[in-house]
Amino acid sequence: MADARSIILHHYDQSPFSEKVRLYLRMKNLAWASVEIPNMLPKPDLMPLTGGYRRTPVMQIGADIYCDTAMILMELERRYPLPTLILPGHEGLAKIVAHWTDRTWFQASVGVVFGAIGDYAPEAFLKDREALTGNPFNAEAMKTAAPMLRDQWRAHLMTLEERLEGGRGAGGGAWMVSTKPGMVDVHAHMNIWFVEQNVPDFVKACLDGAPLVADWYQRMKEFEGQRPDALSASDALAIAQRAGPRLKAATVDELEPQGLVLGDAVAVAPDDYGRDWVTGSLVHADDQCIILQRTDAQAESIHIHFPRAGYLVRRG
Ligand SMILES: N[C@@H](CCC(=O)N[C@@H](CS)C(=O)NCC(=O)O)C(=O)O
């Protein structure tokens, strides 16, 4: 039964960024509760928790809300350090790899997927994604671009093959870095999983030419983890209402570039797409994380955590 200490993931099955967190939870064998959220707006049960952040996934622990997989994984490693997935060699590198997998490679994945299934996607979903990205959906243009994006996608995949090949020379080669699976492997998995869900023949053909990745990917599928407890959105909201946010120490880095101080009214938004500004009062800021306090009629007092890289912060 989920309570204020439970890891609660707000997500949906087909979401590749959610799969990144689910894989992490499986690799750490952590217990978690699952709230299934819609794959497009409106998300009326999520908004009281996130203050308007609409992207997927979101993690909740009590009245603390973690937006973005970068923030979620940092927090899970902080709370559950053993066994760590930031193994020797993964420090810093995992975040560098994530910027490549989540942005450059993911954009190629989106092109490959929508080039293949765009014609079958529901109209409401396509309209939602047009509003999210600010780009009109053009099925013909997507289909025209798809072969070129498949080329790029395979190039990204072959970079992983090169990494595993290089690792073999150094006595490893089963995992992305050194001799055990860690955070770099978590990031490297997402695009293959996403495209395989939607265009499996293409992924199979690419993996035929990348035997080390094919073997690695198969082993990544073998982490079983725990089956999550299903939780309703209203029960998740009730958990937030009853819990108080837990702050380790309310501090603002004295090197904070914009000179922000505790209690300032600030606004935070992703810098790529879905730029919905979340406003609140600053309760913590350092070089990796910013936390806003908000009071919501339904969720009451909550702390919303964002990563710094990939997010815009302004006085708000
Ligand atoms: N940088 C974000 C990206 C999240 C993202 O773009 N998620 C997709 C789904 S996988 C999304 O939000 N789509 C729109 C939606 O779910 O409403 C993260 O790492 O969490």
Image: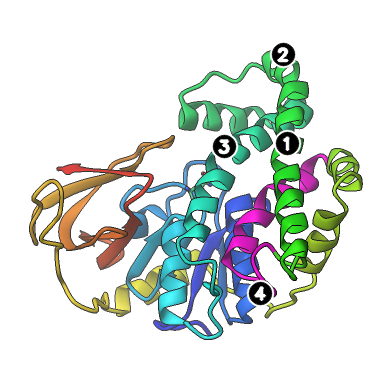
Dot 4 alpha-carbon crowd within 10 angstroms: few under 14, some 14 to 19, many 20 or more: some
The local secondary structure at tag 2 comes to: helix
Q: Alpha carbon of mark 1 to alpha carbon of mark 3: how far?
A: 12 Å
Residue nearer the viewer, 117 or 312: 312
Q: Alpha carbon of mark 2 to alpha carbon of mark 3: how far?
A: 22 Å
Residue nearer the viewer, 126 or 271: 271
Q: Are marks 3 and 4 in contact (CB under 8 Å)?
A: no
User: Mark 1 vs mark 3: which is more N-terminal?
Assistant: 3
- In the displayed structure image, the side of residue 228 where residue 210 appears, left or right: right
Q: Alpha carbon of mark 2 to alpha carbon of mark 4: how far?
A: 39 Å
The local secondary structure at tag 4 comes to: helix
Disc 2 residue type (three-letter): Glu
Disc 4 residue type (three-letter): Arg
Q: Which residues are magenta?
A: 176-199
Confirm if mark 3 falls within 8 A of ligand 1: no
| Residue behind mark 2 | 140
Q: Alpha carbon of mark 3 to alpha carbon of mark 4: how far?
A: 26 Å
Q: Are marks 2 and 3 in contact (CB under 8 Å)?
A: no
| Residue behind mark 4 | 26
The quarter of the displayed image where residue 154 is located: top right
Image quarter of the N terminus: bottom right
The local secondary structure at tag 1 comes to: helix
Q: Main secondary structure of the magenta part?
A: helix
Query: Where residue 176 appears, x then y in whole percent?
Result: 68, 62
| Residue behind mark 3 | 104
| Residue behind mark 1 | 155
